[in-house]
Image (cartoon, helix red, strand yellow):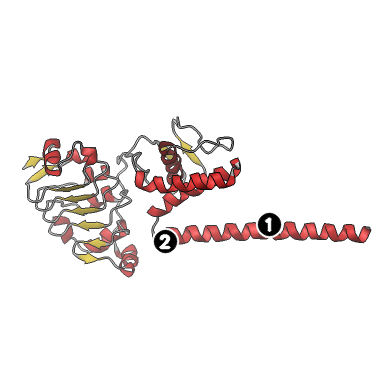
Amino acid sequence: MSRLSEQQILTRARASSLENVKNLNFWGSDLNDISVLRQMPNVEVLSLSVNSITSLKDFAHCPRLRELYLRRNSIGNIDEIGFLKNLPKLRVLWLSDNPCANIENYRMTVLRNLPKLTKLDTVVVEEAEVFEASKQGQEIPTPEDIPFYLDFTATADKNTLKTDVARDDNPQIFAENDKSEPSHDNLVNETNKLRAQLGLKPLLLDDHANTTAAMTTTSAEKKASGNSSDSRNQNIVSAVRILVQDLDETSLLTLRNEIDQRLQSLNKTYSESKNSHEQLEEKELITD
């Protein structure tokens, strides 16, 4: 058995640094120590089947991981699934031929704890199956020692709209008197504050793909409005556009209901204000 090293990864991936590696395949390499993965925050696909891996704890440090192939390893405890519960983008997982896959209700337990999976082992995950897993699967706790992936040390109460940011040294870029265009870094920082309120992991600072389009839209809309309050609203809209890309169907429906209720409230307020104004005008006409 052997340890996966940084040099092995850079050579195989033909990359200049671990942060640049997005896809990695070390199939059948007799690996048991993969702690180097903790230095790979941008990796998206990991193929590590036919090795001697015994724990999933190192994968908890890969926030962008989408596909994880671990067939024929030595993962014996199904509780190891807990280390994957905070990975927001994980959609494909292959754990067959591991000892943990032999437990009763294995599939139901995995899907209960990882309901966003679209494929488990070789079988596509159906929506009805996820619902059934919520009743039949075993609940696995999320390990408390899973670290945050970035420097954005924000804590939030998911049941409120307030964000308690620890040691927040970032400038308030959404201030109403700020007429300058937000920088890429600032937009990412502010978006992460909103993500914290939703219980989502923060974006990486170099996530140009998700933020460039939002910033371009903001620029055009700001020029059209020229109003500081409108600019602030557009900044918030841009941040929300980034956030919704990571929400699942259930979360999107919840958000839509909240928006509908907000619109209904605004329409009601507008109607009441309009009626009050019309009544006042009518009274003045009668008086005259």
Mark sitting on residue 115: none
Tell me where residue 271 appears, x and y as whole percent. Answer: 70, 60
Q: Is 108 placed above or below 208 here?
A: below
Q: Are marks 1 and 2 in contact (CB under 8 Å)?
A: no
For marks 1 and 2, give the CA distance: 29 Å
Q: Is residue 114 left or right of residue 177?
A: left
Query: Residue, x 48% and y 57% (percent of image)?
Result: 255
Tell me where residue 44 appears, x and y as whole percent. Answer: 24, 49
**Which residue is outermost to the right?**
288
Residue type for callout 2: Thr
Query: Residue, x 89% and y 60% (percent of image)?
Result: 285
Tell me the quarter of the image containing the C terminus. bottom right
Tell me where residue 54 appears, x and y as whole percent. Answer: 14, 47
Asked if one can make out residue 159 in the rendered structure from this viewpoint, the answer is: no
Residue type for callout 1: Thr
Query: Between residues 28 and 212, which one lies in front from this camera angle?
Result: 212
Query: What residue is disc 1 on?
Result: 269
Quarter of the image for residue 14 reads top left
SS category of the residue bearing label 1: helix
Query: What residue is disc 2 on?
Result: 250
Query: Between residues 97 and 188, which one lies in front from this camera angle?
Result: 188
Q: Is residue 229 left or right of residue 257?
A: right
Task: Tell me which numbered mark, 1 or 2, is placed earlier along the sequence.
Answer: 2
Tell me the quarter of the image containing the N terminus. top left
SS category of the residue bearing label 2: helix
Q: How dense is the environment of label 1, judged by Cα within 10 Å: few (below 14), some, or many (20 and up)? A: few
Query: Between residues 194 and 179, which one lies in front from this camera angle?
Result: 179
**Which residue is outermost to the bottom?**
128
Q: Is 173 placed above or below 249 here?
A: above
Q: Nearer the viewer, mark 1 or mark 2?
A: 1
Asked if one can make out residue 106 in the rendered structure from this viewpoint, the answer is: yes
